Amino acid sequence: MNDIRIEPKLKEKLEAFGLADNNLCFNCGNCTAVCGLTERDLTFPRKGIRHLQLGMSEKVNQSVEPWLCYYCGDCSKTCPREANPAEQMMSLRRYLTSVYDWTGLSFKFYTSKLWELGALLFVGAIVLGLFGLYHATSAEPIIWDLRDGYVHLNSFAPVMYVHYADWVMAGILSFFLLSNLFNMYLTIMRSDKSLKIPLHLYFTKIFSIPLHFATQMRFKKCDNKIGFWFMHLFLMSGYGFMFILVLVLLPWFQIDQGINWTTYPGYYATFALLYGSIYCIIGRLRKKDEVHRYTHPSDWIFLIMLFLTTLTGIMVHVFRYYLLMPAATYYTYAIHLAIAVPMLVVEVPFSKWAHLAFRPFAMYFADIKKAALAIKK
Amino acid sequence: MTGNNNRGVLFKEHSDYQFIDAKVNSNTLVIGGGIAGIQASLEVANAGYQVYLVEKSGTIGGHMAMFDKTFPTLDCAACILTPKMVEVGQNPNIKLMTLSEVKEVRGAPGNFKVKIEMKTRRVDIATCIGCGICTEKCPARAPSEFDAGISQRKAIYIPFPQAVPNKYLVDKDSCTYFKTGKCRVCEKVCPAGSVKLDDKDSEIEIEVGNIIVATGFKPFDPARAEQFGYGRYKNVLAPLQFERLINASGPTAGQIKMQTQDKKGKWVYSTDGNEPESVAIIHCVGSRDHNYNKHCSRVCCMYSLKFAHLIKEKLPNAEVFEYYIDMRAFGKGYEEFYQRIKEEGVHIIRGRTAKVEEAGNRLKIRSEDILAGKLIEQNVDMVILSAGLEPRENAKNIAGMLDVSSDETGWLTEVNDKSAPFVSNRPGIYLAGTCQGPKDIPDSVAQASAAAAVVLQSIGSGKIKKYVADTTATSL
Ligand code: SF4
Ligand code: SF4
Ligand code: SF4
Ligand code: SF4
């Protein structure tokens, strides 16, 4: 076995990621035994909490367990010390996101509201700047009236340019997310020398990624949490549809001559996002469910951005097709992008949304490790 | 040398108490007839002074009377307690008042006036010959308090064979006559004419110089911790129920049996039941848990180990699993006892049980073995929930009535935890046993004798000892 190095200040480091009083835990194991997702050889949340108490940063970094927790809150409800194990898991996920992120931005965003807000404003300003730059250099005029009876949004934001910009943004985000994922792989799979992992497992277990991603089926295993699982899946389907509409179908989605077939999945996605974000905001204000009781500043920022994105998207649609107000359409469209783009740029690779990639991969890695352990035995 | 502290109370330097002259009444009131109250009463009475022993239930003996063996020596609890109970019954200096409660305390230390409500027994103690015919004929049943609910008693009954006073009593709440207006069978069959169903409660006032409070504890109700299935699943037992199950005078004559259906189809503990092949004992139920009580109840680790031993003794082939968080074997001989139990082959697992579920006819325990870092699912036949100790429901009222302080949980507080651990903040009122906090039998007895010593000091010297307290001092 390798030597174990101790980082006594680890707990304090995690406090910036929302860790409350880690010392409350007296290691009774109740949380592990209550958790419907824990497995014989893959126990959590107590083990992670213990590693934090001891400052075992390598163990913390290597752990997949925090990603296996879906924050159902059962463990926190019955913890005899009110140590809030579920929220400790959440803090670990935030921290691990910053561990995987080689740019250091994630660390900044999670630990400083100023950095996060600054980055959002900065990217938002770039978006508005691009609009300005386009119209300052382009020969095409903006059509401010209702020529032919409809709003000419494409004269303000030509769909092909927006589409290209989409792809550029997606490319940048993918680059960061994938490189962070690779870093995650190195941290989890390569730093633990004690377990040799046969290469073929990486292929045979690959299906767990799409499976867990699409169904979130582990969530359903949590006791009595079908409602949460469904809500989560609903929200995710909203993201999914929107993602396809914007990245692939934009030339159809953003045509000026009225509603077409892409509008209906658009309505569905909008409804899902609106419902989901309002549900979460109200939940966090009411603090009734365990999952909503503790809110890190990054959670609020994310939820508000998501809500505003959806709201301005709806407003664009209404101004454009129903109220036929060109100027209002153009301005809200610019605002819509100045909220949506920064949200994606900050959240997807560096913050809360990164879990959509890390979670299925963690399950993939966990499956591989389990199989490797079985082979070893 | 004397001086004034900042509250203006006169005190002797280097000492946390002073003596104050008073005309001390030599009678003493002891509230509560458990082992602590019994001990305190005997100490004072044997010094030649009058004691009023007030007990809420129909007999003295308290929880200890229900125990089978005592840890760590495994002496039989009744063998220690019963002679003391008999002594209380026979000592002319002790006026025993059962079914009685203190309602009001007036006056000053040295001269308290105490109002006591005496519920009627509905059986005349003086004439009842204890023949038991009434019980035999009585048609009404209720769960037996003495057997912690795992057997039935009649509405006219004797709490247990060694009860003191060794007389019968009528429980109005379960009596057919009081429910329907018809019956009075006991009255008809009694050869001594002792049954007095129409007797009324009464009230008396007594004068005493000192008061010893020994009101004891309430066992935590394990049904409150729903995850363990108590009251919902068969063969999930509270600790006092298990004490009765393994006691020779219990419903299974001391054999460890699982529940079985009687002729009417009800699930009961009887000699017809099967023996369990495996038993789980779960520590810290309702203790050390912010959802219930934060304190450690001190005795449950040890009685759990005692249970494990008794199971192994009676059923050598049974597997016994103990799930604990920390093992508190603090007393003399306790650690040695713990090691002995381990050698007897009991599986002692570090990790709190999170839940008990029904698995067919068996019970599934879910825990984490935290030393191994593994999740454990274990099927067993019987589960014992080592429930902790709580203050009595009316502890706050008792404290209010006596004008003594209690802590946020409800334990009565001592004036100084080192130098006066059994003295309340009100001069003339002393604490003995578990009303002051969870403790085992030796500690309860020691505290009771200590309280009696200070009472006797007061009677002998004609002075009241007043401690300079940090708690809200009550003036003399
Ligand atoms: S977090 Fe709570 S339930 Fe989990 S081990 Fe610690 S004290 Fe026990
Ligand atoms: S929040 Fe739910 S899923 Fe997460 S560790 Fe606790 S019990 Fe398990
Ligand atoms: S029948 Fe009468 S004398 Fe006999 S036990 Fe009952 S009350 Fe006492
Ligand atoms: S004595 Fe043992 S079982 Fe009882 S509360 Fe304390 S630690 Fe828990």
Image (cartoon, rainbow, N blue to C red):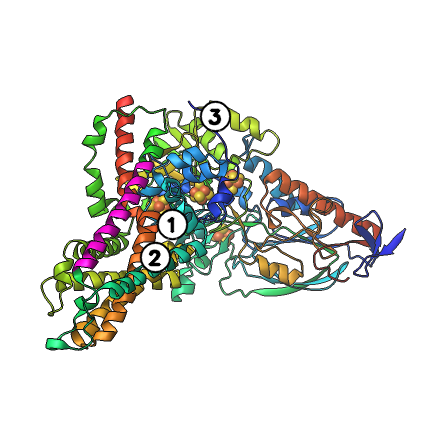
Q: Is residue B171 above or below residue B346?
A: below
Q: Nearer the viewer, residue B314 or B271?
A: B314
Q: Is residue B285 above or below residue B182?
A: above
- Earlier-in-chain disc, 1 versus 3: 1
Q: Where in the figure is residue A175, as x and y percent of width and height?
A: 28, 43
Local crowd at mark 2 within 10 Å, few (<14), some, or many (≥20)? many
Subunit that carries the residue with mark 3: B
User: Is the same chain shared between marks 1 and 3?
Assistant: yes
Image point (15%, 53%), residue name = A248
- Residue A363's tag is none
Subunit that carries the residue with mark 1: B
Residue flagged by tag 2: what amino acid is it? Val
> Closer to the observer: label 2 or label 1?
2
Q: Main secondary structure of the magenta part?
A: helix
Q: Look at mark 1 in the image and give the residue it sits on.
A: B226
Q: Where in the figure is residue B176, as x and y percent of width and height?
A: 40, 61
Q: Look at mark 3 in the image and give the residue it sits on.
A: B342
Residue flagged by tag 1: what amino acid is it? Glu
User: Is the same chain shared between marks 2 and 1?
Assistant: no
Image point (38%, 28%), residue name = B319
Q: Left or right: B72 with respect to A268?
A: right
Q: Is residue B28 above or below residue A332?
A: above
Highlighted range, magenta? A160-183
Q: Nearer the viewer, residue A201 or A171?
A: A171
Q: Left or right: B350 with respect to A271?
A: right
Whether the magenta-drawn stretch holds residue B325 is answered as no
Quarter in which the C terminus of chain B is drawn: bottom right
Mark 1 and mark 3: Cα distance apart in space: 30 Å
Image point (49%, 36%), residue name = A55
